[in-house]
Image (cartoon, grey):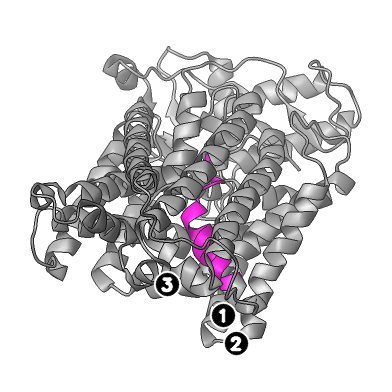
Amino acid sequence: MKCRGILESIFLFPNISNNTSAQLENEKYDFSGNIQSSGLISQHQYQSHAHQRNRRPNAEFGGGGGNNNATRRCIRQCNSLEAGVNLPNGMSNGGHHLERSFSIPTDTVNLKRRVGLFSGVALIVGTMIGSGIFVSPREVLERTGSVGMFLVVWLVCGIMSLLGALAYAELGTMNTSSGAEYAYFLDAFGPVPAFLFSWVSTLVLKPSQLAIICLTFAQYSVEAFLSFPAPESAVKLVCLATIALILFINCYSVDLATGVQNMFCSAKLIAIGIVCVGGLYKFASGSSATPDFGFSGTETSPGVLALSFYSGLWAYDGWNNLNYCTEELIDAHKNLPRSIILGIPLVTACYIFINVAYLFVMTPEQVVASDAVAVTFADIIMGNWGGAPYMRFIIPLCVAISTFGAANGTLFVAGRLCFATSREGQFSDILSYITVGRYTPIPALIFHAVIAGCMVVAGNITSLIDFFSFSAWIFYGGAMLAVIVQRFTRPDAHRPYKVPIIIPWVMLIASTYLVIAPIIDEPRWEYLYATMFIVAGLIFYIPFVHYKLTIKFMVPVTIFLQKLFMVAPTDMMEEERCFL
């Protein structure tokens, strides 16, 4: 009872209506995290707010602590009082975690669970199938050296994505907080590895992915209606407009963002089906361009093969994206593994079929020589047909549709990572605020979109992807290690989905190979630069997060942005589980 009283004093918040301005007028916000009561909330609730505010440190760059840190301190007190006591839901906290046994008002300011099973599958499929399958086949075939090994690499990449996602499903159902690897590193290894992951992902990996996907969309959409190469300035303007449109969609509402994702996911599956039917028609006519699907000429260098896997896995990237928004996934304990099991095999099958279709129509030499395999495919299959000049825009339009859906999903999940990091006090507090009524993390979304836009203007994004592609597999390997470590450090933790332990071990070995093999085979300065950038995160972590150094001008900036975007700190997550 003592623990319950402490929790209630922290967790009871005033209700904030999402559709009436009258209540917002009655509840007076001073836009610094404080709420003054005017009769709509009880004195007990207001005292609870004051209690939480007094517990939260005041820092604006990284050491703000935020609501979650106050919650964590309360949980530590509860665990010290009641370590090992069975919770009402049948779980034992065991000094490790706590799950609320009482209800939270559904209209508090927090992320809402609006992503269902279909939207979860669409998010996985839609972010995995982008521009990679229309471009990467050339690089994979060039590096493998044979058609047989080419297809094996695509299949193995799909299997690796599925195994990795299943391991992530265990982590995501143990801890349903948004942020994926960030939340898992925080649980398994502590705040420093978690911050370094978010440092690299937030400032480089996610924005550069969004930028290069939007550039691909702009390139194909402009060239679909031109008979000559598109000017670079026109492509960049369309790209920036695309980022702005996707930002608006994601800021407006979660329902609109997921609806767009569902629609474009369906459209890109139809586009892949068109390509596959074209290849099947060519094969049925008895004139397959590639008669030998064997392994003659296969590359044997481990480093070169690792690079071929990089190219293939770039096309599969996105298999872990649903874990970034598990707080918004309806019935996450069931729908997370279901979405993975449905989505990733579907993508793998699409990739195998479309690559076989390419090879039915094109020779391996033509695939390697083509910068845009899908466009060359369309040119060959239509040949001298009279309507070809009027139909050549179809494939570029299909690629544009595919990349727009991928860009929408990429910004959706990137905003959740930034939001989760800021909520833990490791980035500026304003990035963890969400809109009152719409429940979208607008500041975090704008932050990512602005960085991506700057990358587009600056150019040379492809080199950033090359520099940091191997660092992504450092973090994937770290997530696999988190599964293994927590099997020993927290053996009694509640695991709604439990992956066979051999899977994270296999993926840990595979990720280690993908990181080390290219360095050994062909050492390059880029690998050192990427490693130095990761370590450089400590320069900001130590003063601003560990020692909670404050930047004074961020206080008025935060207040101004809070008023501008009508955002508020999140009270808590529904069905929140905090891990210590």
> Which kind of residue does numbered mark 3 sit on?
Leu
526 in relation to 268, above or below: below
Q: Which residues are magenta?
A: 306-322
User: Circle 1 sits on which residue?
Assistant: 527
Does the magenta segment cover residue 131? Answer: no
Dominant SS of magenta comes to: helix
How far from the left and from the top, in percent, is residue 230? 13, 65
Q: Secondary structure at mark 1?
A: helix
How far from the left and from the top, in percent, is residue 118? 47, 25
CA distance for labels 2 and 3: 17 Å
Label located before the other in sequence (3 or 1): 3
Residue drawn at x 34%, y 16% is: 23
Packing grade of label 3 (10 A; few <14, some 14-19, many >=20) is: some
580 in relation to 288, above or below: above
Q: Secondary structure at mark 2?
A: loop
In front: 319, or 321?
319
> Which kind of residue does numbered mark 2 sit on?
Pro
User: Circle 2 sits on which residue?
Assistant: 523
Which label sits on residue 464? Answer: 3
> Which kind of residue does numbered mark 1 sit on?
Tyr
Packing grade of label 1 (10 A; few <14, some 14-19, many >=20) is: some
Residue drawn at x 76%, y 43% is: 580
